């Protein structure tokens, strides 16, 4: 199974909608199970740095099949200094979530532009009904 353009379009639309409900302008990235970018959106007004952060959160969630903040917790709790430099650079805080369909990892979504909690909520809202 893979993420289709139609599913990616739906994910981005849902995330933009959720970001607007939170009063945030965000960058949203969707990648495949290998962490390769499939689709991206930077909402009007989103800060420039949010683009790279969203892509790295998605990559982190896909590469480790876990939420980016959960990987961050492991790194911080076990003092794995430098781990964030692996795999081309990872973002280890909230906003990256894996996408699994029928139990299979098919990709990940990364969101940046709000607080870590808002980023997680927007990513979850985007996935609601899909997984």
Image (cartoon, rainbow, N blue to C red):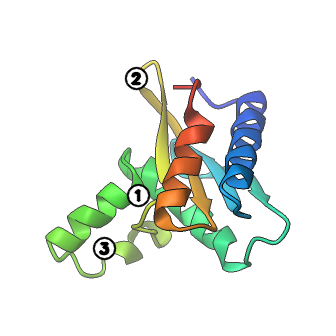
Residue at image location 68% in from the left, 69% down from the top: 51
Mark 2 vs mark 1: in front = 1
Left-right relation of 108 to 71: right
Residue lying at the far right of the rendered structure: 44
Do the CB atoms of the residues marked 1 and 3 lie less than 8 Å apart? no
Q: Is mark 1 on a helix, strand or loop?
A: helix
Sequence order check: which comes first, mark 2 or mark 1?
1
Sequence order check: which comes first, mark 3 or mark 2?
3
Specify whether residue 95 is in view.
no
Left-right relation of 81 to 2: left
Left-right relation of 77 to 54: left
Give the residue pinned by disc 2.
Answer: 103
The crowding category of the residue bearing disc 1, from other C-alpha atoms within 10 Å (few below 14, some 14 to 19, many at least 20), is many
Marks 1 and 3, how far apart at CA: 13 Å
Q: What element carries label 2?
A: loop
Q: Does residue 58 lie above or below 13 as drawn?
A: below
Residue at image location 24% in from the left, 69% down from the top: 75
Q: What element carries label 3?
A: helix
Residue at image location 54% in from the left, 58% down from the top: 118
Marks 2 and 1, how far apart at CA: 19 Å
> Of the numbered discs in the image, which one, if any, rests on residue 91?
none
Q: Position of residue 121 (x, y in %)?
A: 52, 49
> Of the numbered discs in the image, which one, if any, rests on residue 68?
1
Sequence order check: which comes first, mark 1 or mark 3?
1
Q: Does residue 22 lie above or below 73 as drawn?
A: above
Q: Position of residue 105 (x, y in %)?
A: 45, 33
Give the residue pinned by disc 3.
Answer: 83
Q: Position of residue 33 (x, y in %)?
A: 51, 41
Specify whether residue 120 is in view.
yes
């Amino acid at each position: 199974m893979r993420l289709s353009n139609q599913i990616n379009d739906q994910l981005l639309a849902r995330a933009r909608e959720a970001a607007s409900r939170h009063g945030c302008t965000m960058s949203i990235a969707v990648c495949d199970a290998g962490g390769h970018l499939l689709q991206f959106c930077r909402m009007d007004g989103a800060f420039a740095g949010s683009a790279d952060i969203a892509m790295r959160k998605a990559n982190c969630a896909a590469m480790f099949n876990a939420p980016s903040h959960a990987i961050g917790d492991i790194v911080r709790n076990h003092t794995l200094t430098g781990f964030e430099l692996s795999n081309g650079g990872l973002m280890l805080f909230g906003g990256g979530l894996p996408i699994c369909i029928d139990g299979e990892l098919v990709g990940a979504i990364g969101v940046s532009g709000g607080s870590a909690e808002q980023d997680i909520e927007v990513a979850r809202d985007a996935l609601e009904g899909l997984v």
